[in-house]
Image (tube, grey):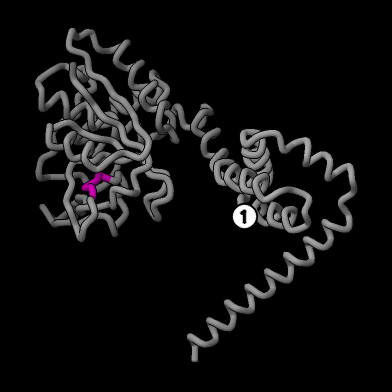
């Protein structure tokens, strides 16, 4: 009975939506004068213009759904063409991310916390430890963890005072922001290399969009760390993480990641000397959730 009610409610919602679309289309068709129609015809010059209109509209209203609904109404009223409307809708999907992108470019978070800087620092410390090369200044080299893991931020700072030194430097001196991704991460990394490293053997970092599974596997097998940034990934959306393993599961590649989140559901604990200490559970993400990947290389 409950399932039937859910189905009826869904069908009722669709019917109301379709009726609203019809009313809006009729209203637009009646109210749209020749000037408005001519304006849209002039705007229909090429695809780039159509994309730009979709991006700009969604950036203003901050809702790709609203832009899409208006576009469908305009097309139904024959004010715009279907090809024109398709450009608006595709642009709307980009425009809805514009706020996050502007936030990344702004100075917000440049002097505070940045998860991208945290994992960039972890990767650099790992490379320095594995290769024996001074990729990290001594004063910024993180201490190695022991069994007595801290159970609070204050305990972490007292026991491992250098743990956040390198990430702080990446934020303050290299401009790695709170929402850095793609070229914003590699740009900050290049600045770090120029100002800190004076080695003949340089370390490089490159980024790619929609990384391939084989490239990730090859990088991990060679002992080099990888960073990934997600976009739409549930509770891990818009997040940069360190990847340090992979596996094949039911025909898909999963990545073992360090999320950097210390919520109880992401962690396990143990008791030592009457205190509870935490460590992170294994977190496996579908490789398809990685929108950007960052590969280290040593020359």
Q: Quadrant of residue 295?
A: top left
Pick the quarter of the image with the C terminus: top left
In the figure, 15 relative to 123: above or below? below
- Residue 138 shows in the view: no
Which secondary structure, mark 1? helix
Residue 144, percent from left and from top: 13, 33
- Residue 198 shows in the view: yes
Rendered residue at 78%/35% (across/down): 42
73 or 207: which is nearer to us?
73
Magenta range is 254-258
163 or 46: which is nearer to us?
46
Rendered residue at 69%/73% (across/down): 16
In the figure, 66 relative to 192: above or below? below
Rendered residue at 41%/49% (across/down): 237
Q: Residue 255 magenta-drawn?
A: yes
Residue identifier under label 1: 65
In the figure, 87 relative to 169: above or below? below
22 or 206: which is nearer to us?
22
| Overall secondary structure of the magenta section | strand
Residue 173, percent from left and from top: 39, 18
Instruction: Report the label total.
Output: 1
């Amino acid at each position: 009975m409950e399932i039937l009610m859910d189905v009826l409610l869904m069908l009722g919602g669709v019917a109301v939506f379709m009726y609203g679309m019809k009313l809006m289309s009729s209203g637009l068709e009646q109210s749209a004068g020749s000037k408005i129609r001519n304006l849209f015809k002039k705007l229909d010059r090429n695809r780039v213009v159509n994309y730009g209109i979709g991006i700009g509209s969604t950036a203003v209203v901050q809702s790709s759904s609203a832009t899409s609904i208006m576009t469908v109404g305009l097309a139904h009223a024959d004010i715009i063409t279907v090809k024109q409307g398709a450009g608006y809708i595709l642009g709307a999907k980009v425009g809805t991310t514009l706020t996050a992108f502007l936030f990344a470019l702004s100075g917000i978070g440049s002097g505070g916390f940045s998860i991208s800087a945290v994992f960039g620092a972890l990767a650099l410390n790992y490379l320095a430890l594995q290769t024996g090369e001074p990729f990290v200044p001594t004063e910024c080299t993180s201490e190695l963890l022991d069994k007595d893991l801290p159970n609070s931020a204050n305990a972490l700072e007292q026991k491992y005072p250098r743990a956040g030194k390198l990430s702080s430097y990446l934020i303050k001196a290299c401009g790695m922001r709170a929402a850095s991704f793609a070229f914003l991460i590699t740009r900050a990394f290049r600045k770090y290399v120029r100002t800190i490293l004076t080695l003949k053997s340089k370390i490089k970092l490159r980024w790619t969009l929609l990384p391939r599974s084989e490239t990730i596997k090859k990088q991990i097998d060679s002992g080099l760390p990888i960073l990934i940034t997600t976009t739409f990934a549930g509770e891990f959306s818009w997040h940069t993480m360190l990847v340090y393993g992979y596996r094949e599961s039911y025909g898909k590649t999963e990545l073992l990641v360090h999320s950097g989140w210390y919520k109880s559901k992401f962690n396990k604990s143990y008791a030592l000397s009457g205190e509870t200490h935490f460590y992170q559970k294994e977190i496996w993400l579908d490789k398809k959730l990685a929108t950007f990947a960052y590969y280290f290389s040593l020359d």
